[in-house]
Image: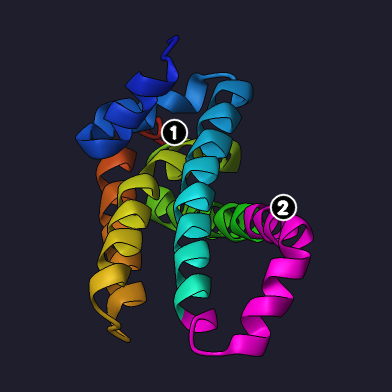
Amino acid sequence: MNLNIYQLLKASLMEPKKQAAVRIMPIGKIMRFIFLFILVLTIAAFIEFITGLNNVSGDLEGLLVYIEEIEWLLYPLAFILLFVSTTLYHFIKISLFAWIGMVILKARKRRGEYRHLWRTAALSVTIPTILSFGIGFFTDNAWLPLLISLLTLVYLYMAVKYYPKMPPQRK
């Protein structure tokens, strides 16, 4: 299986069979997809940071002067820190959902390893993350993270259905 970045994005949207099939792909392809996805998220969050900073600093004259003086240092450092923290958060999230996916895998009596589920979880978190990011602009709901996590579990559950079944146990 050799999918490009666009095909991986398409598979992450609503193709559980392909999400399950990425378990046999090289990890490098999945990593490229993840880092490109994180870069897009970081750019969107950075734009939000810049526009939010300008709105806040417009009220405080002294802060505005200070920001203008260190602007050359503030923006690159903020972007790097945002990218690193987003990467760390995303990798932890994928790892936790892969661990939960192992429980789902065992419960459904399917074969697979943690590394397979990690790759599948990397695609399963894509749409819920985009939804969370988009909905976060319009509402500040305390239940949103739980709902997004449940949606990710639904994606993972649907993908695990396409993992191979356990062989029958001989007595």
Where residue 88 appears, as percent x and y from the top left, is 66, 57
Comparing 74 with 11, the one in front is 74
Tell me how many marks there are.
2
The answer to whether 151 is drawn above or below residue 166 in the figure is below
Image depth: mark 2 or mark 1 in front = 2
Where residue 136 appears, as percent x and y from the top left, is 32, 70
- 144 left or right of 30 in image: left
- Residue that badge 2 annotates: 76
Measuring 75% from the left and 56% from the top, which residue is drawn there?
72
Please identify the quadrant where the N terminus is shown: top left
Q: Quick one: label 1, few (<14), some, or many (20+) residues within 10 Å?
A: few
Comparing 55 with 142, the one in front is 55
Measuring 47% from the left and 56% from the top, which residue is drawn there?
47
Where residue 5 appears, as percent x and y from the top left, is 43, 22
Secondary structure at badge 1 equals loop
Secondary structure at badge 2 equals helix
117 part of magenta stretch: no
Identify which amino acid the numbered label 2 is placed on: Pro
Q: Looking at the rendering, which quadrant does residue 96 occupy?
A: bottom right
Q: Looking at the rendering, which quadrant does residue 111 occupy?
A: top left
Residue extent of the magenta highlight = 56-84
Residue 170 marker = 1
Please identify the quadrant where the C terminus is shown: top left
